[in-house]
Amino acid sequence: MTDVNPRRPRIALSLTLALASTALLPGCGVLPGGGDDGGTVKVWLMRGSASDAFMKRFEEDFEKRHGDLDLDISVQEWTGIGEKVEAALKDDDGPDVIEVGNTQVAQYVDQGGLEDLTLESARDLGMEDWLPGLAEPGRYDGGQYGVPWYAANRVVIYNKDLFGEAGIEQPPKTRQQWLADTRRLDSGATQGIYLAGQDWYTLAGFIWDEGGDLAKEKAGTWQGVLDTPAALRGMDFYQQLQALGDGPPDADEEHPPQAEVFAKGDVAQIIAVPGTARAIEEENPKLKGKLGYFPIPGKTAGKPGAVFTGGSDLVVRDGTDERKGAVEVVKALAGEKWQKDLARTMDYVPNKTTLASAVSGEAGVAAMAAGAARGRATPTSPQWAEVEADNPIKAYMSKVLGGGDPAREAKAASGRITKALDATGP
């Protein structure tokens, strides 16, 4: 991609200047940006992100603590949200605070629609403890535009009975032990693991563990890098693991839904978000109480594997007349009190590693939080959505699992990624 934006300050420099600027301000209550005291802050949250009860608790508490501000919270549908947000960012009467997917921030910044929150992030929000998978995609051109709200990521869901029958008393801590245990489980009528051939989010974690990536930016141009030695090692591990079950090589985890496959009772493991367990138990009530969770193992016992982190960031519309109030809303939602409340209410991972204890009582969420500490997100190119629209990573995986040469197929897929990320193309 040709860099059409000439200002590209380094992130570290931007944050250093932000911290230095803090010392010049008379107090944390003084925020840059306009807007008179008081007013109504319009907030868009997404369907399913927070319960009605949570939103009511938050609104009542916020308005009580900020007597000069009113909240107008509306819930939006995920379907078609991209175009709706793009239009709202150009509307002078649009929402002031918007929840967006963590990987969507870059495209909205690139269109010039978001306020830079670097100063507030460094001064008031404890950004040094943010989950990397939420913080990094919220950062663009040296500024912090997206403030992490909540996270979710994949873990291993396993059948305790099948593990017990195979003599496996403790979940594996390393990738090699995971392979060894899965080989033991893959016996007779039991699948060691059900892993679809096109589960590219899981593959991304293995690639990151090896030090590779999906795409890299160099001198303002994004390039696919699936053909690097590190990325190829990640694909090799995926291939070894996927072979220990009957997952289709030419389909993703939703075709058929892996929860339905697991619910039949003859699959020892799947890789999914913990909430998938509810769908499994609804499909097969006999499995209630028989499901366990562990973080995706890493290369060493001391660190879980890298995982793709999904979730949401909070952004502020550029030019809003209620900037001060909007920042107060973001600070509250991203602060410790409401982070703990949201995590316990919705079974999410809080936005900071230091708040993981808030979900320690829930086995699935605790496993998710352990993995989130090493979470990552997709490349921050504003054009990344073009890659996912006709995903060459999925096709690459199927070709390799079908017997294709990994290096040759990776090079071809990398070329397609590079073309999709080229902002100067047709």
Image (cartoon, rainbow, N blue to C red):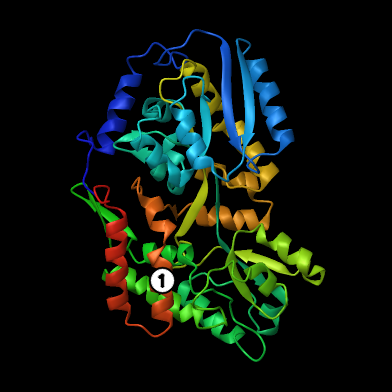
Residue behind mark 1: 395
Vertical side of 110 occupied by 225: above or below: below
- Give the left or right position of residue 240, taking residue 155 as reference: left
Question: x and y percent of residue 122 in the render?
Answer: 39, 30
Question: x and y percent of residue 177 in the render?
Answer: 50, 77
Residue reaching furthest front? Answer: 426
Residue reaching furthest bottom? Answer: 188
Q: How crowded is mark 1: few (under 14 residues within 10 Å), some or many (20 or more)?
A: some
Vertical side of 358 occupied by 116: above or below: above
The structure residue drawn at horizontal position 38% and vertical position 53%, both measured from the top left corner, is 386
The structure residue drawn at horizontal position 28% and vertical position 31%, both measured from the top left corner, is 14
> Residue 60 falls in which quadrant of the image?
top right
The structure residue drawn at horizontal position 59% and vertical position 76%, both measured from the top left corner, is 194
What secondary structure is marked by label 1?
A: helix
**Residue 148 appears in the rendering:** no
The structure residue drawn at horizontal position 40% and vertical position 15%, both measured from the top left corner, is 33
Q: Which amino acid does label 1 sit on?
A: Ala
Question: x and y percent of residue 120 in the render?
Answer: 42, 25
Residue reaching furthest right? Answer: 286
- Give the left or right position of residue 418, taking residue 391 as reference: left
